[in-house]
Image: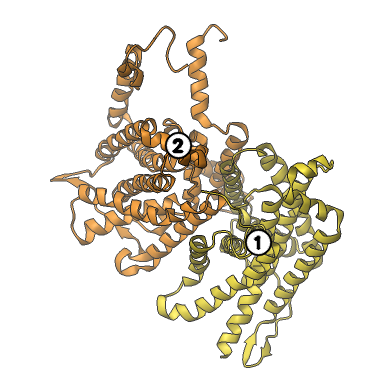
């Protein structure tokens, strides 16, 4: 059901095309036009939310490569993001590096830290690996909090906004034009990566690493590559986050965030290119909804102790993760493909 | 010297509590191969529940404890019945992720019901410190260690002689064989979660009677992970040996390293141990080494 009714592929070129028919091109162009004109009519606050969604999408695309395609569970993704964010902060503040160079360095540094913590994946998997990445998360944040000479610890560090040459991205709409194109490029890269030799090797390692090795895939190298790529994305997302938020400390990258990222790709759909986008959009907008709702709930139940509504968001996300795992373990992306298949066949049942 | 003895004794005592909580993890892992990452959150919520019963509702201490254990039984049953059972047979990733979801949910629930962040349980151990050689140790630690040891003994007897205990060990050994013997395997899973919640609750009461109830109890869960990793995931003995080791490393390390490195090193030590064990001996001291190529 990957093609609309009556469409056939007669050449490799059309077979590998992501966007195949004229209608799809039209819809895609329309989508791009609507997306890139957002700053014209979306209020500033919501533009900020969209920017955050973009950053989140970049980060969990990396997590999706690692968990969804290569099957190596990582629950320390926020920690790797922190590495990228602090690299940008230190390089631009202390060394005066231009933002773009710092941006690339952030990805690389996070990737290298990811490689170090990915080493145990050569010997262990499943829960053991999960616990190692949890340890990574806490060690990274601890170092950030206590290496005060460089990171300013709990005090937090402030970062100036990104600039290219003399152009400074100093408003939400300018940030939008920085973040969203990078997000789009990352989505394109990840989609193509999954279809390439590397992506297929990742999937083979995930599904059966023994069989993958027999087929001639260097399992160690590909696992480490997955860690590097996954953490590289986390690093560049962290870099964008740092300059977007302007001021941060270790509290911006908690263990709870790491869990939330894993939750997002599960909700979106593991091992699909659409999954991270759907998961990030759903969870971030749900967060906004809870933020909007909490004061009203506090107002309605005034007999209860103050501050109780702060727990609501955690409860909602925990519940959403559990419900998705129980009722729709393949995520929203699977729902979407079912829907697509059914409307292409409509009005026939099959 | 006095310092050293003090660190050793408190370290071993706290380590025993970690071991007790870790036992709950090993139980679930052995019977159903589910890695319960919500350990710290179970400790947190049962400590808060005890607080509600004994301080807020002003019930007598013993009744509060009994109610906490009942609450733990209920919690364990609910978690197993409504989240883990529908996922039987799913890949390990889903099983780990669902416990993360539970952890997130419980944390939210705790903030929702008890928005105050710090509280203290009533002291129920004698308060006078005792002298051991040159060191002065608070009695609470000794009591906590003794209770943990007692519980560990009781649980070992249960697993050795009680019918249910034997069935649980058999499930850990071979799930197909035990199903062929007409043992309802889902009930075993349910029981293992209930036991895990009970030991987490008791561990929580012990540790929060010493240190008070804070968000830091979640970290007790992480420390218990390091116990499990060091001891080997499917070994009860491993838990009991590794628990005091972790406690010792943590207390002695914190005592002597804090002046050198700075405050907060205490929280990091369990994670460093995890990384070291992963790189050197991933299946732990007593864990079953499965021969497989990865």
> Label for residue A231?
none
Q: Answer left or right for A223 relative to A263.
A: left
Gap in Å between the C-alphas at discs 2 and 1?
40 Å
Q: Secondary structure at mark 2?
A: loop
Nearer to the camera, A242 or B169: B169
Palette colour of chain B: yellow
Q: Residues within 10 Å of mark 2 (few under 14, many from 20)?
A: few
Q: Residues within 10 Å of mark 1 (few under 14, many from 20)?
A: many
Nearer to the camera, A91 or B170: B170
The reply to whether the C-beta atoms of the residues labelled 2 and 1 are less than 8 Å apart is no
Q: Which scheme is used to colour this image of the protein?
A: by chain
Palette colour of chain A: orange
Residue with the mark numbered 2? A215
Residue with the mark numbered 1? B22
Above or below: residue A152 compared with residue A305? below
**Residue placed at 56% from the left, 91% from the top?**
B1
Q: Indicate the quadrant where residue B252 lies.
A: bottom right
Residue extending farthest bottom: B134
């Amino acid at each position: 059901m990957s093609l609309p009714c009556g469409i056939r592929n007669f050449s490799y070129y059309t077979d590998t095309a992501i966007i195949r028919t004229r209608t799809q091109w039209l819809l895609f162009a329309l989508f791009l036009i609507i997306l890139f004109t957002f700053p014209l009519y979306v209020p500033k606050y919501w533009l900020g939310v969209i920017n955050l969604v973009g950053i989140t999408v970049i980060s969990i695309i990396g997590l999706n490569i690692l968990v969804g395609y290569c099957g190596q569970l990582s629950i320390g993704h926020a920690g790797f993001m922190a590495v990228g964010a602090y690299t940008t902060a230190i390089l631009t503040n202390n060394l005066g590096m231009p933002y773009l160079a710092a941006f690339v360095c952030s990805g690389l540094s996070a990737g290298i830290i990811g490689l170090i913590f990915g080493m145990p994946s050569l010997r262990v998997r499943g829960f053991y690996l999960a616990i190692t990445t949890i340890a990574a998360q806490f060690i990274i944040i601890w170092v950030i909090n206590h290496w005060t000479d460089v990171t300013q610890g709990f005090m937090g560090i402030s970062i100036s906004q990104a600039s290219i040459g003399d152009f400074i991205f100093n408003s939400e709409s300018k940030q939008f034009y920085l973040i969203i194109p990078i997000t789009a490029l990352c989505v394109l890269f990840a989609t193509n990566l999954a279809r390439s030799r590397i992506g297929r090797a990742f999937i083979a390692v995930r599904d059966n690493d023994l069989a993958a090795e027999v087929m001639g895939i260097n399992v160690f190298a590909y696992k480490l590559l997955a860690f590097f790529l996954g953490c590289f994305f986390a690093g560049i997302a962290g870099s964008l986050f740092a300059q977007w938020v302007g001021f941060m400390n270790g509290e911006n990258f908690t263990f709870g965030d790491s869990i939330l990222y894993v939750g997002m790709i599960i909700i979106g759909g593991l091992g699909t290119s659409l999954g991270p986008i759907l998961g990030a959009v759903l969870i971030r907008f749900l967060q906004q909804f809870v933020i909007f709702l909490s004061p009203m709930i506090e107002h309605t139940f005034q007999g209860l102790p103050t501050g109780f509504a702060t727990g609501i968001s955690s409860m909602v996300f925990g519940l959403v993760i559990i419900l998705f795992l129980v009722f729709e373990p393949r995520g929203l992306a699977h729902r979407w493909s079912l829907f697509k298949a059914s409307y292409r066949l409509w009005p026939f049942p099959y | 010297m006095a310092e050293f003895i003090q660190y050793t004794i408190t370290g071993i005592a706290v380590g025993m509590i970690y071991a007790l909580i870790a036992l709950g993890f090993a139980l679930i892992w052995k019977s159903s191969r589910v890695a319960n990452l919500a350990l710290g959150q179970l400790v947190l919520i049962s400590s808060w529940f005890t607080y509600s019963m004994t301080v807020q509702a002003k019930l007598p201490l013993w009744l509060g404890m009994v109610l906490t254990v009942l609450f733990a039984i209920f919690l364990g049953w609910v978690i197993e019945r409504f989240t883990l059972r529908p996922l039987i047979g799913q890949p390990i990733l889903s099983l780990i992720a669902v416990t993360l979801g539970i952890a997130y949910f419980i944390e939210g629930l705790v903030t929702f019901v008890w928005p105050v962040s710090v509280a203290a349980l009533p002291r129920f151990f004698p308060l006078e410190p005792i002298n051991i050689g040159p060191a002065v140790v608070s009695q609470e630690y000794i009591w906590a260690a003794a209770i943990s040891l007692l519980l560990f003994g009781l649980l070992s007897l249960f697993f050795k002689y009680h019918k249910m205990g034997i069935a649980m060990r058999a499930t850990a050994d071979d799930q197909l064989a035990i199903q062929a013997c007409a043992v309802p395997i889902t009930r075993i899973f349910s029981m293992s979660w209930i036991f895990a919640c009970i030991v987490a609750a008791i561990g929580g009461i012990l540790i929060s009677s010493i240190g008070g109830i804070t968000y830091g109890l979640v970290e007790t869960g992480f420390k218990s992970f390091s116990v499990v990793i060091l001891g080997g995931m499917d070994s009860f003995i491993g838990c009991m040996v590794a628990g005091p080791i972790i406690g010792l490393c943590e207390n002695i390390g914190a005592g002597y390293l804090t002046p050198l490195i700075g405050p907060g090193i205490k929280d990091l030590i369990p994670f460093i141990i995890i990384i070291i064990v992963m790189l050197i001996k991933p299946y732990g001291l007593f864990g079953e080494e499965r021969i497989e190529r990865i």
